[in-house]
Image: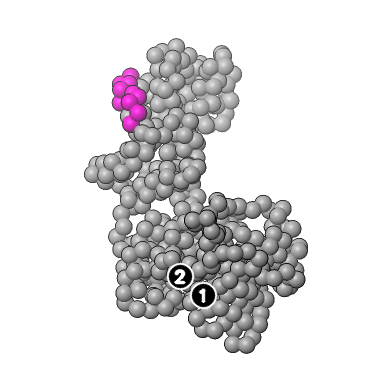
Amino acid sequence: MIRGLSIATLLFVAATVARAEIPALPPTFSCQDGEGSSYRIWTQRDASVLQAVEKGVSREIPLSPANVLREAPRTGETQFFNGWNPRGKDLFAMLNLGTEFAVRYRIENGSTRVHVGIVLGHRERTGLSCTASGYSARVVSFESEAPASVRLAGQAAAYARMRTKAGELDLVAVLGIEAILRRAFASSEYSTPPGREGFARNFTVALNPIDPASMKQIAARLEPPLAALLETLLTDTRYRVYPDSSRHAQWIREGFSATPRNYTSIAAGFLRFAESPGSRQGDIKGFFLQEIHPMLKALDEEEIATIRVLGGPTVRAFVTPLWNRAVGKKTKDDYPEIPGMVSELAELADPETFDPQRFQEKLGLILRSKIGANPETLEYFVEDASSYVKQLTPRQREDLKGWLEDSGERELFAELVK
């Protein structure tokens, strides 16, 4: 997934930035860190460059366009320029998250205030003192705003919200969190006991919602010493004992709070909980429903339809009665005649005794009944009966189609075997 930038723009930049060339214009920013190294940064539409002079050695590093693989920044939000190799075989090989220049512009009390940050080799450059070229602005480092544990936890949490509809992190998120962890473990703050406590406290919210399969992927990308540090961090955040029901509820909460709402995240939360053993345990299910009830009630009919499509049959069967109950609609339990009709159709759908004419007559009766006259009850009926109808062989389904008399019967049968 490419966030914030079109493929056409990326291809144009890849063709343009064949190598890092120092522009003729003055640098956008000039900085010096606490160890005496100096940096000049040019942020331009077609070719951004970071020049670093460390221990007398100068190197020029091409930078990507802003926020490749991240959400496009809104006004006042941080822009991230990462290392860029235009000769990479794909976008992931082009982008180097171990190199980064971050900048945020804001107007405060009528004057421009700029925050900047520099990362090289997965290590944040600290003690930065910077100036801007061409305009008057106060330039300070992100380091002065908050400790590394707070800032890096915020970035990790943003990546952790990039999940698929199955609940696993997408590749961008895996790579991003790997890079954030490398920075965390390289920071001077992490090297002290109070610093490690700060990282555990702040990273709890970022790491605990990540599903175990994705966490295993992240750990596999780290060298053994760093993987051991990650395991210690997961112990400190109590990741291993974090309840799955809380994790799945958090996915729904994150998707609901996003602007615009992230229906993929909401669907993933419902799907993974519905598939979990906890969904069949009264106390755990009750806790989960208590957590998500206010959000479920606030979703409108169009939104819940989107979530059901994204989540598939499992989510549709699980969330429909919950949402109906939350908004005051009747649920499947309010229609005791449905199980009887399902049982009758299941008997007729037995492949061993299947009679297409009798099956067609039953479909017609269902459509003319109270169940068939109400789209809501008909949907409940289809959910419960479809697994039986799907047992019919392809030949039996074709035979039945020849007996179906009108579009209503054909549409109902199509829903039952979908």
Q: Amino acid at mark 2?
A: Glu
Q: Residue at the far front: name it.
A: 110
Camera sees residue 257: yes
The disc at residue 143 is 2
Q: Which segment is the magenta one?
A: 326-337
Query: Which residue appears at 56% of the width and 64% of the height?
Result: 137
**Residue 329: x %, y % from top left:** 35, 24
Res 24 quadrant in image: bottom right
The answer to whether residue 123 is seen in the rendering is: no
CB under 8 Å between discs 2 and 1: yes
- Residue at the image position 28 percent from the left and 41 percent from the top: 290
Question: In this figure, which residue is indicated by the disc labeled 1?
Answer: 128
Foreground residue, 204 or 40? 40
The reply to whether the magenta stretch includes residue 334 is: yes
**Does residue 397 lie above or below 150 as drawn?**
above
Q: Amino acid at mark 1?
A: Leu
- Along the horizontal axis of the image, is 62 left or right of 196? right
* Label 1: few (<14), some (14–19) or many (≥20) C-alpha neighbours in 10 Å: many
Instruction: Give x and y (percent) for residue 78.
Output: 53, 59
